[in-house]
Image (tube, rainbow, N blue to C red):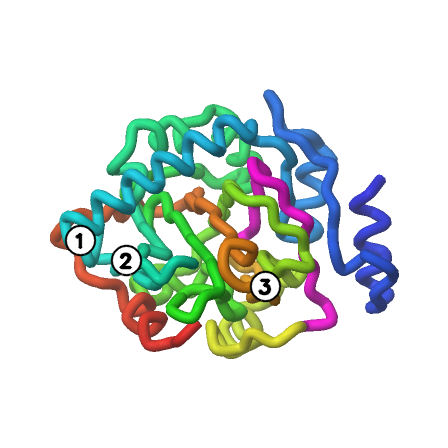
Amino acid sequence: MQYIFFLSELRKKKIVPNMNKFNSSFYLDDKTEESHLDFFKANGFIVFRNFLSPQHVESILHEISRIEEQLLIDGIQKINGVPLKFGKDADGELSIQRICFSSLYSDILKKVVGDNRLLLLKDFLSPFDARINEHEKDGLVINNYIRTQGSSFSKMGWHTDSPRDIFLGQRIMPMLNIGIHLDDCPAENGGLRVLPGTHKQGVFKMLFGKKYFIDNEDDPREVGFDINKGDLSVHCGRLWHRVKESPLYGIESRRRVMYIPMITGKKAPKNEFSKTPFYHRISSKIKT
């Protein structure tokens, strides 16, 4: 099975041709398979192919453009206390490179979040009672990575998602970050990188294993992906991951992806009166 071979090579701590670029053949239909659960348990991530059709992706991209235009017209700077991230597109025009709680502005995106297949991912957090909630964390996030002269969002340094719980005064709870990819992105063009197996690390290594968001250096243990538009990625909140900058510029460097968290523990919905979380105040000071 592909995941056994993959793990055996990682344990040898050597990179064989293309083995630092994992090409998944997993698909998510009407149930999770034992092979899905085994791979995720061992590695802390999994990629499902063809979750959305190309036509569905195009309709989502049109909707994202509509939302962005409306937010710019309305002069919105924050949503539920979370700052939007602004930059310049390939034409030098103002754009929003990170939109949070986006499904609150769109029935089309609400249907994406409500896809019954996403509920199958609860199996990866069993026996915890897991949920997707558009009003918690940052809701449905739209990331628009692009490398231009005026871009403020072309990469993201190494981090895990779990310390957010600490900043919120809670103990670290199991969670998933679910990504729906809206552009083709071969590994050579940058994009998602993960350190397989680091979801099993202790709290000390999770907090101090790397310099959060500042460290964006290549790691010999990291794995990249040949992503196709419509693919679905899932990673554990404890897993070290980053977004590698594209070597290209302009439209060719663009990588758009939507993320929604699947979380456990006490509910903590946000609203228009919510304060900006401490970790967002920190990240706003870090140039990417």
- CA distance separating discs 3 and 1: 30 Å
State yes or no: residue 166 in magenta.
Answer: no
* Residue pointed to by mark 2: 84
Q: Earlier in the sequence, mark 2 or mark 1?
A: 1
State yes or no: residue 220 in magenta.
Answer: yes
Residue 50, given in percent of the width and then of the height, sits at 62, 31
* Residue pointed to by mark 1: 76
Residue 21, given in percent of the width and then of the height, sits at 74, 55
Left or right of residue 271: residue 129: right
Identity of the residue drawn at 42% across and 64% down: 153
Q: Which secondary structure lies at badge 2?
A: loop
Q: Earlier in the sequence, mark 3 or mark 1?
A: 1
Determine whether label 3 and label 2 are within 8 Å by CB.
no
Instruction: Give, as a three-letter code, the residue at label 3.
Output: Leu
Quadrant of the frame with the C terminus: bottom left
Crowd class of label 3 (few under 14; some 14 to 19; many from 20; radius 10 Å): some
* Residue pointed to by mark 3: 248
What is the quadrant of residue 234 in the picture? top right
Magenta stretch, residue numbers: 219-236
What is the quadrant of residue 88 in the picture? bottom left
What is the quadrant of residue 277 in the picture? bottom left
Q: Earlier in the sequence, mark 3 or mark 2?
A: 2
Determine whether label 2 and label 1 are within 8 Å by CB.
yes
> Can you say whether 151 is above or below 40 in the image?
below
Q: Nearer the viewer, residue 272 or 246?
A: 246
Q: Nearer the viewer, residue 191 or 10?
A: 191
